[in-house]
Image: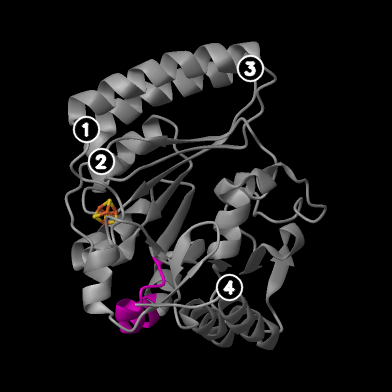
Amino acid sequence: MKLISIQEAYQRKFKRQKAIKKLIYDASGHCAHIGKLSPGCYHCFVPDLSSRNFYSGNKCNLNCTYCNSDKNQGSNLTAKEHLATKASLFKQQALSNNFRPTAMSFSGGGEPLLYLDVISSYMKVLRDIERRSGHKPWYYLYTNGILADSKVLAQLKKIGFDEIRFHLGASNFSKVVYNNLKKAVHYLKVVTVETPAWQLHRKKLFAMLPLIEDIGVKHLNIGEIELNKYNYERISKIMPHGEIYQCYETHLYDGGLVYDIIEEVIRKKYSYSVLDCNCFVKSIQRSPAKRTRHEDVPGLCAKY
Ligand code: SF4
């Protein structure tokens, strides 16, 4: 693969952004989007040190080419033990500090719904903190969607989740997952699709746009693939001429795919928001820059 300069990568992005007149910029330009974002995205752009993303475990029932997690590390039991320890430490911390998280989420280097029992125990702790502190964060969970059937969705609702985010590309946009996506809108307040700008999915991504409009998806987040030692070899075999650049992480340049999608959503007047969840977002979300308070974030997210 070819490493391109940060100037080259950014200039290409800025050129595409400039051509989309309806693009909205928040967090001093780090957040480029159309429509109001999910409340779960808010904490990425503000100095919110109370919000957390909990890694549930690294087992997965799929095997994406671009997956960048180490599947050989740890076991289910370790994940359970690890979470249990973290939960109790977190509870002590939360109840002793000025604790005002805007969001609590579950993702990880694996499929969170394989760890539903662990997540349920964790949610009990979080809901208990919520009752004692009188402050309710937005609860959301990521999934590849394979296991998100009616029974699981009903349980997620029961234990307090507000939102579920489907990674449709993981199953190559399978019928099973589309069916589960349809069911999800009847259980959760908000259903989001968050799937990567993987150029090999281009056709399926475009075919997805009218389908998710009809289903009632509220938000679409598209980010670039992040490369590390676990996926570099696999991706470079498939895309020997792929271009990569370094920002806070190392990203596979998407060839402008996210802007092509945003232009199509504007053209077709679809109602969901689209977030360009690329290197600028990861940079503000993960770096010490997160402590900077930008002026323009209060109206960033939809209210539910
Ligand atoms: S669904 Fe997620 S965790 Fe599973 S293989 Fe794909 S990218 Fe990795």
Mark 1 and mark 2 in contact? Answer it, CB < 8 Å.
yes
Which tag is nearer the camera, tag 2 or tag 4?
Answer: 4
Residue 5 image label: none
Q: Mark 1 against mark 2, which lies toward the viewer?
A: 1
First reached walking from the N terminus: tag 2 or tag 3: 2
Residue 260 location in percent, x, y? Answer: 50, 84
Residue at numbered disc 3? 133
- Asked whether residue 271 is in view, the answer is yes
Q: Is residue 1 above or below residue 193?
A: below
x and y percentages locating residue 218 in the rendered image: 51, 61
* Mark sitting earlier along the chain (1/2): 2
Looking at the rendered image, the disc whose residue lies closer to the viewer, 4 or 1, is 4
Q: Earlier in the sequence, mark 3 or mark 4?
A: 4
Query: In the visual, does 72 lie left or right of 210?
Result: left
Task: Name the kind of residue labelled 4 in the image.
Answer: Ile
Is residue 178 shown to the viewer in this render?
no
- Determine crowd level at label 4: few under 14, some 14-19, many 20+ residues with C-alpha closer than 10 A: few
- Numbered badge on residue 58: 2
Which type of secondary structure does the marked residue at label 3 adopt?
A: helix
- Given the image, on which type of amino acid does mark 1 rest? Gly
Residue located beneath label 4 in the image: 6
- Find the residue positioned furthest to the right: 295
Q: Amino acid at mark 3?
A: Ser
Picture quarter with ligand 1? bottom left
Where is 101 relative to 190, above or below?
above
Residue drawn at 53 percent across, 11 percent down? 92
The stretch of residues the image draws in magenta is 196-208
Q: Amino acid at mark 2?
A: Asn
* Secondary element at image label 1: loop
Q: Earlier in the sequence, mark 2 or mark 4?
A: 4
Instruction: Provide the residue designation for mark 1.
Output: 74
Marks 1/3 in contact by CB < 8 Å: the verdict is no
